[in-house]
Amino acid sequence: MAEAPAAAPLVRATPNSLREVVASRELANLTGPIGSGKSRLAAGLGPVSLLDLDRPGALERLSTALAEYTPAPLVVDSADDDRALAALEPLRLRPPGSGRPVLVISRRSLLARPGWADTGVAVVETVPWPDARIGRLATEARVTDARCRELIVRLAAGNPLIADAACRAFHAGAP
């Protein structure tokens, strides 16, 4: 029986670091809080198969997607609840070298879950966006008032989902 590869050190998520990890590891886990840009980062990987476990029927399609013989990575998004983790059990148990590359997107690291420590999973973690990047997001969303942009930056605390919601609220007339 092949031995699981050693766990890779924690990697900070950037488009390049995510591409490198997915290209070099059989199993990767992109983690971060809700709205931190995980799905956006994964969308930049290029040609992949995407399975969002929040969509109807996705859990039932997971075993077939894992068994497909293809070098194209499988991106499994929304792997956060007990049902999703139970559906990932075949992935956790598969021998090294026996399947396609998989990127699991979740809020918590798979390594924080029982039984995943010896899988060789490489964890890539999103980090809060810098204030300047949140400010650019507000500018691109056509928030022209400098004080409003500054407020959006403070409210977002580095989270692009919160920044986007604040920009929409501004355009909807929020005081």
Image (cartoon, rainbow, N blue to C red):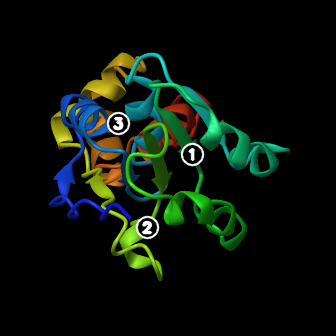
**Marks 2 & 1, CB-CB < 8 Å contact:** no
Name of the residue lying farthest toward the bottom? 114
Mark 3 element type? helix
Residue 149, percent from left and from top: 31, 34
Q: Secondary structure at mark 1?
A: strand
Q: Quadrant of residue 157?
A: bottom left
Q: Amino acid at mark 1?
A: Asp
Q: Residue at x 37, y 65 (%)?
A: 119
Q: Position of residue 35 (x, y in %)?
A: 47, 48
Residue 8 lies in what quarter of the image?
A: bottom left
Q: Return the x and y of residue 84 as percentages of the image width and height.
A: 67, 62
Corner quadrant of residue 55: top right
Q: Residue 94, position in %: x, y?
A: 51, 58
User: In the image as oriented, which residue stretches furthest toward the front?
Assistant: 1
Which residue appears farthest toward the right when viewing the image? 57
**Residue drawn at the location 46% of the way across and 78% of the way down:** 113
Q: Is residue 55 above or below residue 49?
A: below
Per the image, the residue denoted by label 1 is 77
Q: Is residue 9 left or right of residue 163?
A: left
Spatial CA distance of label 1 from label 3 is 33 Å
Instruction: Identify residue for label 2.
Output: 108
Amino acid beneath label 2: Arg
What is the spatial separation of the Cα atoms under label 3 and label 2, in whole angstroms? 32 Å
Q: Is residue 162 left or right of residue 129?
A: right
Q: Mark 1 vs mark 3: which is more N-terminal?
A: 1
Q: CA distance from mark 2 to mark 1?
A: 12 Å
